[in-house]
Image (cartoon, rainbow, N blue to C red):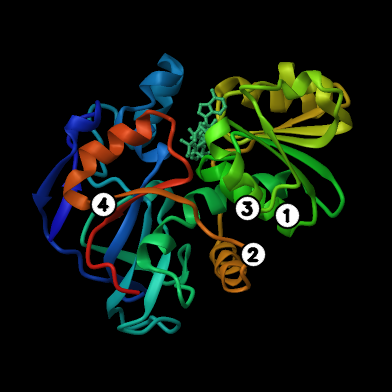
Amino acid sequence: MRAVVYDRYGPPDVLRLEEVERPAPREDELLLKIHATAVTRADCATREANRRSGLLVTLISRSISGIRRPRQRILGSEMAGVVEAIGSAVRNFAVGDHVFGSTGFRFGAYAEFICIRENARIAHKPAGISFEEAAAVCDGGLNALWCLRLADLGKGQRILIYGASGAIGSAGVQLAKYFGAEVTAVCSTKNLELMGALGADRVIDYTQEDFTRNGQTYDVIFDAVGKHSFRRSKGSLRTGGKYLATDGLRNLILALWTSRFGDKKVMFSIPPRYTQQDVVLLKELIEAGDFRAVIDRSYPLQDIVEAARYVETEQKTGNVVLTVRGRET
Ligand SMILES: NC(=O)c1ccc[n+]([C@@H]2O[C@H](COP(=O)([O-])OP(=O)(O)OC[C@H]3O[C@@H](n4cnc5c(N)ncnc54)[C@H](OP(=O)(O)O)[C@@H]3O)[C@@H](O)[C@H]2O)c1
């Protein structure tokens, strides 16, 4: 089968298309013929061993992914496709089923086929959406769900989402509305309209207005893009308010510190623990019309280097998808 592989950490050019052996499913696994996958910020960070986050994070990253070279040669955690074969113990999926989901840090989805356990983070693809749309659901969807649950976001609470137009942010806006919160989305001018379409109650263009200076306060501030800080947001949090982080070693330390001291908390928990039920919830929300993945660009698998370069600009709106097979639903 064709797969995108890499043998050393580095820039997008280390990725190349190669013929590799097609995997065979174990008894509790299904073999999925992948039609679409997504290029995520986590893929890019892993590929370069988190070089941009400093030496300590690079060392942690290499100790997980392989000290000298990556142990898992195939990146890609998101996928949507068709079940090609099943192991003898598989009960809930059958050959021909349309499935989507995420392998998380096991990766392996930049390929034509992948084996995945039937109790992994997968679900039947919602009717009426394409494989491309389905492949774009879980990166932002699962991350945002994990974060919002961490903050115990509830009905009537006020949340501000910074970086609301990224993969996590665009999912966060929709899920926060689903949880009954009052949502203020912060993004740049080009994404204002999208925020309204996703259901935000208020939108702030950060090129025109600094939310930390407008006198408004929130129960939760969700930095969905890792570009703000607890220190700068603190004054806009109500007493007992929570700052939700998605990135940055300093936030782990702040989470520990604020769990004991102060009346405003930093919430950051890695690695996130997603379940199959979370993927099923996203499927149900899509079917109910309460959630959709935002797709910025789509590339064929062979254009992986170009796709990764674009994701690394940190300017994608929502998700970037790779089409592995045809586009039929
Ligand atoms: N904790 C985890 O498990 C985990 C997993 C995956 C990713 N992450 C992290 O989560 C973060 C978000 O990932 P993502 O894929 O959702 O991001 P993304 O899609 O790459 O975010 C891109 C968007 O961020 C906005 N943006 C860029 N620079 C900004 C700035 N300086 N200030 C405000 N907004 C800015 C841009 O929109 P506008 O033009 O509208 O501002 C752009 O559309 C990343 O830091 C990533 O490393 C964490």
Do the CB atoms of the residues marked 1 and 2 lie less than 8 Å apart? yes
State left or right for residue 326 relative to residue 44: left
Q: Which residue is mark 3?
A: 198
Sequence-wise first label, 3 or 1: 1
* Mark 1 residue crowding within 10 angstroms, few (<14) / some (14–19) / many (20+): many
Determine the CA span between mark 1 and mark 2. Answer: 9 Å
Disc 1 C-beta below 8 A from ligand 1? no
Disc assigned to residue 177: 1
Q: Position of residue 304 (x, y in %)?
A: 22, 43
Sequence-wise first label, 1 or 4: 4
Determine the CA span between mark 4 and mark 3. Answer: 29 Å
Do the CB atoms of the residues marked 3 and 1 lie less than 8 Å apart? yes
Numbered disc in front, either 2 or 3: 3
Figure quadrant of residue 265: top right
Sequence-wise first label, 4 or 3: 4
Q: Which residue is mark 4?
A: 110
Q: Residue furthest right?
A: 239
Sequence-wise first label, 2 or 4: 4
Sequence-wise first label, 1 or 2: 1
Q: Residue at x 59, y 34 (%)?
A: 163
Q: Residue at x 29, y 32 (%)?
A: 309
